[in-house]
Amino acid sequence: MRRKNPEYMKEIIDFVDRFYPRYGRSPSCSEIAANTTLNRSAVHNYLVAMNDDGMIEYNGQTILTPNTRAMQQEMRRIGIVGSVACGLPTDANVEQDEYMNLPMTMVGNDDVYILYASGDSMINAGIDDGDMVLVRRQETARDGDIVVAYVEGEGNTLKRLQHEGNQVILHPENPMLADIPVDFLKVQGVAIWVFKKVG
């Protein structure tokens, strides 16, 4: 590994670890190059050198990092049910057109689903427009949880649940937006993971 930049190695591994849960496969050298500061040839050379050093397993096509190797051990197919801003199916048997394979170590046997985040109300919680949010389906939540909540007359929203005395507050994690006091809401799930856009 002499003369190999550790920052570039970390950049490659981080990208592979983000890419694999989203697409269920290893990225190609071209895909890594398009989303890092390295060119395709440099990516290939780094992968070979990292394989030789035992940091990853690379056979010219599949890349296994410690994280993706663990992910491969046991996976679950999780439905992507749409965007939180467009309404949330509450029927557990609703059919999904899109799925994502996630490791059992992440989701266990919980009743979970995935939503695309829409808008910028949760950016300070690390949830950006277009991110994918893994949600555990449940009807209760603790103060401070990020919840998918149905607000009567408004529809579904993704906000942080807070209480001020007897008042329920939906708190946006964006200083440009005001808290939303509500008289009634129905918790439909609690956010447990966020998957960032690649690239």
Image (cartoon, rainbow, N blue to C red):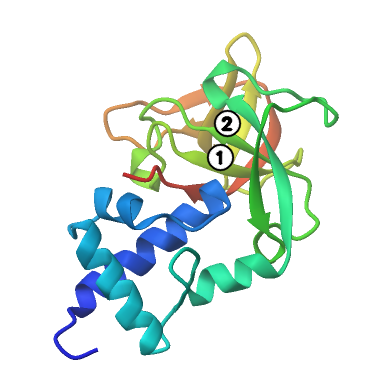
The reply to whether residue 24 is in sight is: yes
Q: Which residue is mark 2?
A: 167
Label 2, secondary structure: give it: strand
Counting from the top left corner in percent of width and height, residue 39 is at: 19, 57
Q: Nearer the viewer, residue 58 or 103?
A: 58
Labels 1 & 2 near each other (Cβ < 8 A): yes
The answer to which image quadrant residue 84 occupies is: top right
Q: Few, some or many C-alpha atoms within 10 Å of disc 2 (few <14, some 14-19, many ≥20)?
A: few
Spot the residue most to the top.
153
Q: Which residue is mark 1?
A: 163
Q: Height in image: 67 above or below 183? A: below
Q: Height in image: 77 above or below 159? A: below
The answer to which image quadrant residue 150 occupies is: top right
Q: Amino acid at mark 1?
A: His
The residue sitting at 42% across, 46% down in the picture is 196
Q: Height in image: 56 above or below 164? A: below
Q: Is residue 54 left or right of residue 138?
A: left
Q: Nearer the viewer, residue 156 or 80?
A: 80
The residue sitting at 34% across, 44% down in the picture is 124
The residue sitting at 54% across, 41% down in the picture is 133
Counting from the top left corner in percent of width and height, residue 92 is at: 83, 31
Q: Height in image: 8 above or below 185? A: below
Counting from the top left corner in percent of width and height, residue 186 is at: 71, 27
Quarter of the image for the N terminus: give it.
bottom left
The reply to whether residue 166 is in sight is: no
The residue sitting at 17% across, 78% down in the picture is 5
Q: Nearer the viewer, residue 76 or 179?
A: 76
